[in-house]
Amino acid sequence: MLEIKGFGHAYDGHTVLHDVHLSVADGELVSIVGPSGCGKSTLLRCVAGLIPPDRGTIHADGVPDSVAIVLQEYGRSLLPWLTVLENVVLPLRKATDRRALALDALEQVGLADAARKHPWQLSGGMQQRVSIARALAYRPRLLLMDEPFGSVDAQTREDLEDLLLEVRGDAMTILFVTHDIDESVYVGDRVVVLGGSPATVLADLPVRLGPGRDQITTREQPEFVKLRAEVGRLVRNRSQ
């Protein structure tokens, strides 16, 4: 579904990403982790077509016609003068069944009863659910998530992780950027680690935890503990 070859990008002559290669199949959820400033968000923006790469190629089926983005700062992405339903409907201008799609998405994230409220009337976690609902309503083939749970408390973060695993569909491919190593393993089918200066792909690790993940039992599994330690060492550039 997504093929990145020899990708690189620079800002003001400073190369941030260099020679990045990444293939993502239909329906995969790929977590991307790495130190702050290594170019994770830049990679997402280039995949979305918001900025052109300086070098290399990015081929993504359906982009930009079927891509949605969920950002960390939900307060900046939701319009406070619109209701929850109106915020979700906003990007669906070409759809003939806009209201039905929006209501279905709100039902998916457990906010059907909040459709007539305004974002400022909701908690932070609920506002991020609205952002996720807006992305789901668009029915994207590719969903880009840039640290989407980084601004909420720990309990809400776990709830949103489980929500993501619940609502993801077989036809939706997801790139999920996070600073949280545990989270990258818990939600991902694979964990891609970026690092170095300039950054490139240090590792592309499969996550063999299977479906039906649980915040308690999954995190106790030896495979989870082993993988999170491996990712942690790579991110922190420590030897085995």
Image (spheres, rainbow, N blue to C red):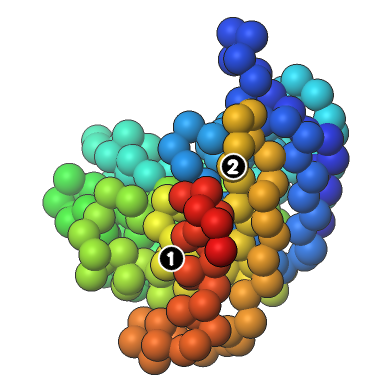
- Work out whether 207 lies above or below 99: below
Nearer to me, 66 or 96: 66
Q: Residues under labels 2 and 1: Cα distance? A: 18 Å
Q: Residues within 10 Å of mark 2 (few under 14, many from 20)?
A: many
The structure residue drawn at horizontal position 24% and vertical position 35%, both measured from the top left corner, is 81
- Work out whether 34 lies above or below 137: above
The structure residue drawn at horizontal position 48% and vertical position 32%, both measured from the top left corner, is 37
- Where residue 167 appears, as percent x and y from the top left, is 51, 73
The structure residue drawn at horizontal position 24% and vertical position 47%, both measured from the top left corner, is 119
The structure residue drawn at horizontal position 54% and vertical position 84%, both measured from the top left corner, is 223
Residue underneath mark 1: 183
Q: Amino acid at mark 1?
A: Glu
Q: Amino acid at mark 2?
A: Gly
Residue underneath mark 2: 195
SS at mark 2 in the image: strand
Q: Is residue 122 left or right of residue 215?
A: left
Q: Is residue 3 left or right of residue 112?
A: right
Work out which residue is located at the far top of the displayed protein and give it: 12
Work out whether mark 2 precedes mark 1 in sequence or the reverse, and give the earlier one.
1
- Work out whether 57 lies above or below 27: above
SS at mark 1 in the image: helix
- Where residue 78 appears, as percent x and y from the top left, is 34, 40
Q: Is residue 108 left or right of residue 209?
A: left
Asked whether the residues under the numbered discs 2 and 1 touch, taking CB atoms below 8 Å apart as contact, a structural biologist would say: no
- Work out whether 217 lies above or below 180: below
